[in-house]
Amino acid sequence: MSSERIAIFLQDAQLAQTLKHTTLLPAGYTVQQVEDRLTLEAMLRAQPPDLIILGDLLHDGPGGPQVSGIELGESLLKLNPGVAILMIASQDSPALTLAAYRSGFSDFIALPEAPAHFDELLQAVRRAIQRRKRLLDWMRLEVRRSTQSLKKQVESLEALQKIGRAVSSSLDLDNVLTRVVEAAVELTGAEEGSLLLLDEDSGELYMRASRNFHEDFVQTFRIPTSDTLAGDALRTGRPVILGEKTPKKIKTAYLVRHLMYVPLLVAERPIGVLGVDNRRSDRPFTDYHLTLMKALADYAAIAIENASLFDRTEVERAKLETILTRIKDGVIVVDKTRRLLLINQTAQEAFGIHGATLANKPIADVFQNADLLEILNSDCNQEPFRSEISLEDGRVFNAQATPIPELGLVVTMQDITHLKELDQIKSDFVSTVSHDLRSPLTAILGYVELIQRVGSVNAQQKEFIHRVEASVQNITALINDLLDLGRIEAGFDSRKEIVPLLAIIQFTVDGYLNRVKDKDLSLDLDLPSELPPVLGNPVRLRQMMANLMGNAIKYTPSGGRIAIRARSEGGQIIIQVSDNGPGIPASDQPYIFDKFYRASNVEGDTPGTGLGLAIVKSIIENHQGRIWVDSSPGLGTTFTIVLPVTDQEL
Ligand code: ADP
């Protein structure tokens, strides 16, 4: 027995009742008589009937407003488009019939006289229910079909996503390419798949990865790019699709029915092709397969490009590593947080450290050498600078530190032990010769002075004697400077005492007052009433002040201004000697503390040996202090000295 459900809503409840009992129930339908719109809507939401029979005019509930059956039917169809509606009108009206069909009702029937037309009605009911059933079956089928196709698409997308992840996370090219070919075969349902790459040397295509091909075939597979389908795809950069009823060996190395080749493009340049084929099955490849193959080919191209970039980077890295390892200079690189990034063999040997686990360690855990640690701890934003590193075994390295703001600090070191030894030999020689020259020079000076005392000399002879005296005095000054420098460098002045620096400055200034006046210079003194004492050699500290002040007076033209300032700050004494003289060209500034260096600003007849600042620097270093120069050509020069204060009492 049929169990279809019918809802019936007519203005004439009596007619509805009659229809139900005389026709519908006997035909096996389950019938529910409805008297208002709300009940109908609730039915549609909960469990839609197979058919709704509506009158053309209705009372919405007993005594309720009158509604049109067409309007009610339309709103019900909006609620559930799958429901079948049969309209029963009290009279035949072409306009009403048209409106019912236009609104999507299943059928329209005029019932002017009941029950003569009840048979006709039953047939209409059967038709409508049948039609709805077919419609629902078709819809179910369609839904299943599109669900399946969606499922397939989701699977394809998941497969593509997996390959994408493999491409970006794996550097194993063989593995990635094999997965691409496998995915191509699976997603297109093909029998075989291959990835062919161009061999640049021979101009042929070889099989780089494959699925379902015999291993021997893969090994020996080589085809030219001309006159082959794969070659066509490669040369044109466009996909090639073949579909044949019978297997053909058209421009391929083997018999196929269906085949698809998609080019692999790297920066628009084809480097190979991805292919799938069916030899036995007659299943053709579709546009959707082509879209998938293109995506897979892109992944393969990216993987190949990544691998080649990685290879190139690796080669460069290996080259750099070889250079760094083999180079005879020591190289140390630290990052901004003072962790070791790199140390080459030479540097490892110099500092007696070994091991592959040094990278990323804090420098304090790796090195003990104080000179090196001081360099490595310097400010990464400052200018490149040079320094020396003394090793325990007596070797000396020249270290060039280059701060690299984004990275940290790079230190390169060259062994200058040999140069240092030569320098020492030279200094020893100079000091011996200077020493040996001093006595004969004193004798010359003595005898020259005696000449005038032992007899009369004419004016010209007097002039010559004067010149000899001046020259001998110059040589004596040079020799004294050399001897001083030798002594200071050799550390013969190591005996230190508490020195009142203020008195020393004052004493030096007093000694120069006459020269300041003679040259018509103005002198600014900015000295505090007290300065803490320093531990040092008073003679050398006076020499330091005298050399600096002497230079300021010597190089500043008449009418100029010189200034001496001193202050104590944070356990240090800072002394500045300034002038508004010619200044020192920037290119000369790094060298003015070298022995015998005279800058390009010195006029030819300015007396001097080029040793004064070398002596000053040696003295300051012997006192654990620092000196630097700030100078602008045309504006003047300032030398700044920093000396540590001693905590010992005067
Ligand atoms: P010198 O005997 O030539 O003065 P120094 O070692 O004292 O030798 O100075 C080295 C060079 O530095 C000088 O030759 C000069 O070019 C430059 N110099 C030193 N002090 C001054 C200064 N106050 N003003 C300008 N140039 C200076």
Image (cartoon, rainbow, N blue to C red):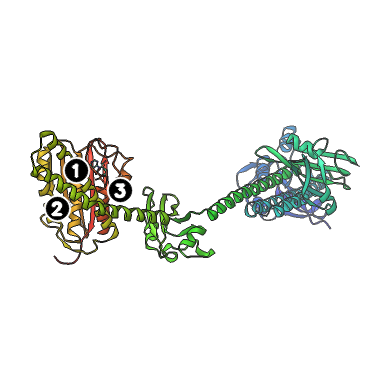
Residue pushed farthest front?
455
The three-letter code of the residue at mark 3 reads: Lys
- Earlier in the chain: of badge 2 and badge 3, it is 2
Disc 2: which residue: 505
The residue positioned 16% from the left and 47% from the top of the image is: 445
Q: Is mark 1 within 8 Å of ligand 1?
A: yes
The quadrant where residue 558 appears: top left
Disc 3: which residue: 595
566 or 476: nearer the eye?
Answer: 476
599 or 422: nearer the eye?
Answer: 422
Residue 360 rendering spot, x and y as whole percentages: 48, 61
Residue 271 shown left or right of residue 310 in the figure: right
Disc 1: which residue: 552
Q: How far separated are the C-alphas under marks 1 and 2?
A: 14 Å
Can residue 285 be spotted in the picture?
yes
Residue 406 rendering spot, x and y as whole percentages: 44, 49
The residue positioned 52% from the left and 53% from the top of the image is: 327
